[in-house]
Amino acid sequence: MSHPLPLDGLSAIVTGAGRGLGRAEALELARLGAAVVVNDYGQPGRDGSGEASAAPAEEVAEEIRAAGGRAFAHLGDVSDHAQARALVELAVSTYGKLDILVNNAGILRDRMVFSMTEDEWDSVIRVHLKGHFNTTHFAASHWRTRSKESGGPVYGRIVNTSSEAFLAGSAGQPNYAAAKGGIVGLTTSTALALAKYGVTANAICPRARTRMTEDVFAGFEEPADGRLDPLAPEHVSPLVGYLASPSAARVNGQLLVVHGGMVAVVERPRVAVKFDSSKETFSFDELDELISPYYQDRPANQTFAAAEVLGLKRG
């Protein structure tokens, strides 16, 4: 007797699903039984340049259907509020409801902070952070309405995509690192706001070889013996499938690093040391006496403890 698949009867949206991580995630959700709306804007440049094309999303949707799954392609820019609404409405009208939202769409426009233009900053923040907000807003509204109509919690899962660039720093990506840090804040806020409706929201920091990271991992060659590449997106997609499933009902507001057969749960920042003034308030001299010695023997470029423990690099 065959057992039902974990995501049977559920519907999902995966943004940026025409290539790379999004494609692997859409295929995994479909393999686990979900009906998928494959969203992608289809521009050829990883910086968001070039003409939009339905082809990448259509190809992934066809791949899912050829394997016996259900999928529908959507050409749309999630950084546009109206197009994000149309995406959620398409999932609801096609499958009757939306259960899972995986936000993955993004672009890169790398530059050192002293060289970055306003447009390079705005465009990356818009696609990553605003794009995550737009789809989350309309999905959350859908779940809240359903919960009020049913008088109880409904099924809802959000999986957002952050990055180790936020955790460990990335000198040439101030826009990207800021957007990915903002996504973590959006995720934890959303998790608190939607928990009473039965919805969870979590974020992942994936490390994978994709069009977005081709220069980052240029020195790490793929295995020549046929083994799965440690940086393959297929190492990331199982975690997304798990977080989208009923089994992850108690996982909410979490940040997880994932790559190469490893998943690490990242704790929220903790106080490393505390200084108290001996008077009503601090003077400059007292702060200098207390704080300067603490940093005297520490690396000048030290980042979050989580990044040190995991040995994280840019990704």
Image (spheres, grey):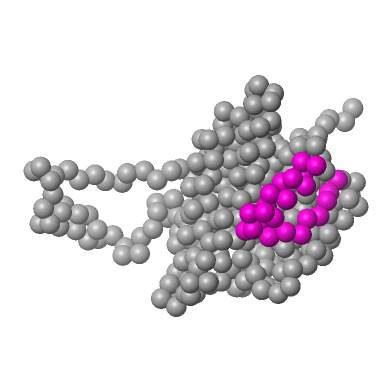
193 drawn magenta: no
Which residue reaches farthest top? 151
Left or right, residue 295 beside residue 231: left
Q: Residue at x 46, y 66 (%)?
A: 174
Residue 34, position as x, y percentages in the image: 79, 41
Q: Quadrant where the N terminus lies? A: top right
Residue 209, position as x, y percentages in the image: 65, 64
Q: Residue at x 67, y 65 (%)?
A: 210
| Residue 255 visible somewhere in the drawing | no
In front here: 248 or 218?
248
Residue 111, position as x, y percentages in the image: 49, 74
Left or right, residue 303 beside residue 145: left
91 drawn magenta: yes
Quadrant of residue 93 in the image?
top right
Q: Which residues are magenta?
A: 70-93
In front here: 216 or 25?
25
Q: Residue at x 69, y 23 (%)?
A: 150
Q: Residue at x 42, y 55 (%)?
A: 308
Left or right, residue 247 beside residue 109: right
Residue 128, placed above or below residue 204: below
Left or right, residue 61 beside residue 254: right
| Residue 294 visible somewhere in the drawing | yes
Residue 100, placed above or below residue 249: below
Residue 141, position as x, y percentages in the image: 63, 38
